[in-house]
Image: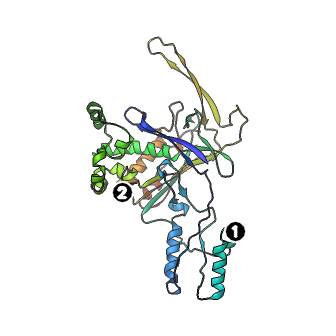
Amino acid sequence: EDTRTHHMRNRHTNTVLDGALFSLESCPPGTLAEVLLWLEGSSENKERDEAFLAHLAGFFIPERGGFLVGGNAARGIGRAIFQPDENARFKAFEFRNAASLGEYLDFRQNANDHFSQKVKAWKKVSIPENKTSSDRLTVQFELKIPRGQDLLIADGDMVPQRVRDQEGKLCWRLPGSTLRGLFRSWITRLAAREGKDVVDMHSKYRDSLSSGTSYDGDSLAWLFVKKLERQKEKETLRREIPEKYPVQYLFGTGFQRGRIHFSDALIPVSSESALGNLAGEENYRTHVRIDPITGGAVPGALFSNTVLTSQLARSFSVTFFVENPQEHEAKWLAKTLQALDFGLLRLGSSKASGRVQLVGAPAASGVFSELFTNIQPFETEE
């Protein structure tokens, strides 16, 4: 299992909110699972049942973004997709036939024994070739570190995040939660510039400080509704949120889950270094805090960290999807992706440049996908 740490930042002070630092455990990247579903049907409804299976299997197609399993999807985990070149399979057992019924009973009794070998002979679920979804926008893009730039997204230990996948291979990780936070912050700015109502405006932050109102993750998640009134106001908030609070409608609140998901991106480490040594794409950086009055170094403020450099052999492959996207949401997301490519937005710690860049035009499918496929990456000298 993998233990990872997350936090929520106060975007007005750029510090961690009180009580907003937490850790969670998740399965390693690439974890495999075999899922077996039983569907009761009849020979008269055979076509309908197979169409239902095709619809169900369509959720796990990578081009549609995958299917979210478990909690903490906002942290960049829980996305489930088919293995490469694999698909769902099915077998119909005819209970009115004694031999078929016996085959069903044998399989049901011993389903866990050599399961994958048993189902290889089953019929593949026929999924329509059009792999796009009418109610989902899926965007895939590649991010690289340009020459002369570096990146640090640490996990409390001043080194770039790395994790072992289910095969034991060490990988660099670009957390989906980091991209989610970056996109949310910039989209909040875009919404405010368009005159939309933004819950986390600086004026409300000042008012909360002057009135002594708690300003924490819980208050933000519930749009500053008092705890004793939340259950009574929940349904009203759900009705109002699409028009009144567009940013929260996209990213989620304490009373309604978000409709957008960013997945972690992984790159295998070039070579696992010996203890105390660095990988080829990792470099040391040393920093010191300077006293603004004397111009000298502050005692005890000399520290070091490591960063990822442009020596990475591959780029980070990022996927995000939005359920039932609105046109203004797709435009905000496209503008944010362009701002990231231009260098207006930086990822991770200030102890690295945080500059990343698109590698080629994004691949997108579903509604409003043309807003992304028309993006031309910003070119820099190599």
Q: Which one is nearer the viewer's eye here, 335 or 346? A: 346
Query: How far, Cα to Cα, is label 1 from label 2?
Result: 49 Å
Query: Residue 277 location in percent, x, y?
Result: 70, 32
Q: Residue furthest right?
A: 274
| Residue 344 visible in the shown view | no
**Please, what secondary structure does the residue beneath circle 1 have?**
loop
| Residue 26 visible in the shown view | yes
Q: Amino acid at mark 2?
A: Glu
Count of residue discs: 2
Q: Residue at x 64, y 88 (%)?
A: 98
Q: Residue at x 68, y 47 (%)?
A: 169
Q: Quadrant of residue 271?
A: top right
The circle on residue 47 is none
Query: Residue 86 location in percent, x, y?
Result: 63, 66
Q: Nearer the viewer, mark 1 or mark 2?
A: 1
- Which quadrant does the C terminus fall into? top right
Give above or below for 144 relative to 54.
above
Residue for badge 2: 327
- Left or right: where 99 falls relative to 259: right
Mark 1 crowdedness (10 Å alpha carbons): few <14, some 14-19, many ≥20: few
Q: Quadrant of residue 381?
A: top right
Q: Which one is nearer the viewer's eye here, 238 or 169? A: 238
Residue for badge 1: 113
Mark 2 crowdedness (10 Å alpha carbons): few <14, some 14-19, many ≥20: few
Q: Residue furthest top?
A: 294
Q: Residue at x 41, y 53 (%)?
A: 258
Query: Residue 27 location in percent, x, y?
Result: 59, 51
Q: Amino acid at mark 1?
A: Asp
